[in-house]
Image (cartoon, helix red, strand yellow):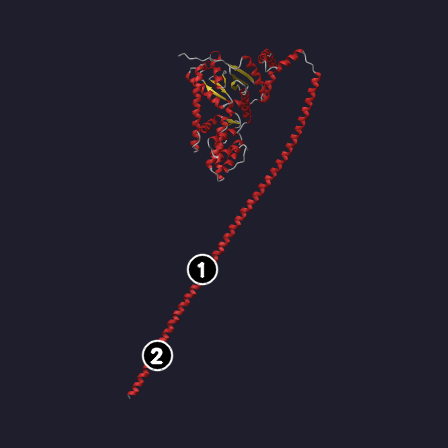
Amino acid sequence: MLGIIGVSGIAGAAIGTGVCYLWLKKSTQNKFSYIESEAKAKANAIAKETELLLKSAHVKIKENELEQEREFQKRVAKVDERNRTLILKTKELTSKEESLKLLEKRVLEKEKQLDKLEQRKQEEIANTVDKMQHIASLTKEEAKAYILEKVEEQSRADVANIVRKYEQIAKEEGERKANYILAQATTRYAGDFAGERLINLVNLPSDEHKGRIIGKEGRNIKTLEMLLGVDIVIDETPGVILVSSFNLYRRAIATRVIEILVEDGRIHPGRIEEVHAKVEEEFEQKTYEEGENILIELGLFPMHEELVKLLGRMKYRASYGQNALAHTLEVAKLARVMAAEMGGDEKLALRAGLLHDIGKALTQDMGGSHVDIGVELCRKHGEHPTVINAIYAHHGYEEPDSVESAAVCAADKLSAARPGARREVLESFTKRVKEVEDIALSKEYVTQAYAINAGREIRVFVNAQKMNDNETVLLSKEIAKEIEEKVQYPGEIKVNVIRETRAVNYAK
């Protein structure tokens, strides 16, 4: 009985163990199936997310490719446009070059024709001279005149006496030609235009001051004209006198001297000299201050004192009727704007434009090219190489080597070429008057020379210690003859040579 119960217990335990095992197995399988399903779901989600990311990446890559394609097309279009512009410019330059070559060819042909004509003229002159030498015979008086002409250098005093004897004859012959000369002059003389720009008016408190300015026997007005180098016109116009000179600086000083004398009331030669010296000193300071104000306004400090003074003096200088300082400021400001547009140095362009014509401040005193004078001044005072190049380049002495120099050249052309900027008639007049003065100053023992009366008279002052009265007659003839040969002018020019002796002493 007990054995049966024991076997049954063992069997029951075995069955229980089996059932338990099966339940655990089943439970484990269900758990693993859930985990597997969850893992598969996550894997599917990751796969879909990855697919979406890939698609998004492909879209972005495509968009970048399209953007790059559009940018490339734009650049290609710009390059094509530049190429078309360059082709057009090249064609234009080629056309201009061909025109210049054709013009040069024509000029060369004209020069050859002129050379042939000159050669023929010289041959005909030589033949005519030969014929005259064979035909002509000299009288005793003619031979004497010929000999006197040859020994003129050794016997200047004798020749001067002969010249004086025939002076009256020459004047009488001049009277007969006066009407014709005046008729020719009036057709070529721009009176209104020259008067507007070459004359200053000085207002007087009363007409009584006209007599004071003239002085006893004209001493005061003679002193004024000789000392100031201007022409003073006193006519019937009430309350004013005219101060005339082609030199603006000299005219401004003269106007100021007369104004001070009129205000003071004391007018005599000694006082005139004293006031003139004071006004000259005042103008030196004034020109420096004007130049300094320009530099302050433009922000171009520092600059050497001499250049600052010359810059202020350009206010009293004109070129082709255009005020030199106004032209300079116009060029400087235009050059600054153009340099800024082209990516250059604005301040350097402004400085180069301001100094491009600085030599003109000295040309009336020194003569010569304003380009060479300007370059010498700027080199002496350490200006930037671009400034030097701009001075040379604006008149074609060099090629522009920078954006700033090119801007100055272009600005100079714009300022000079705009309508109404310049007057060729006035410039030719002032050049002619200056040339007449230079001819007189080139003679030995001449100390001063002033062109007055609108260029129709020149007053020449000589060293009284080294030249006698007879020699002044010859000198006036020499100057007049050289003016006739070298200067083109309407009408006639009076040459007035003055030899003055002055004795000065002091009572102590």
User: Is residue 249 something that shows in the picture?
Assistant: yes
The quadrant where residue 160 appears: top right
Q: Secondary structure at mark 1?
A: helix
Q: Residues within 10 Å of mark 2 (few under 14, many from 20)?
A: few
Q: Find the residue positioned furthest to the front.
A: 154
Q: Secondary structure at mark 2?
A: helix
Nearer to the camera, 38 or 270: 270
- The residue shown at (30%, 87%) is 4
Number of numbered tags placed on the structure image: 2
Query: Does 118 sit above or below residue 15?
Result: above
Quadrant placement of the C terminus: top left
- The residue shown at (52%, 52%) is 69
Q: Find the residue positioned furthest to the left.
A: 2
Q: Is residue 291 left or right of residue 399?
A: left
Q: Which residue is mark 2?
A: 19
Nearer to the camera, 398 or 25: 398
Q: What amino acid is found at the position of numbered circle 1 in the picture?
A: Leu
Quadrant placement of the N terminus: bottom left
Residue 113 screen position, x and y as percent = 67, 29
Q: Which residue is mark 1?
A: 53
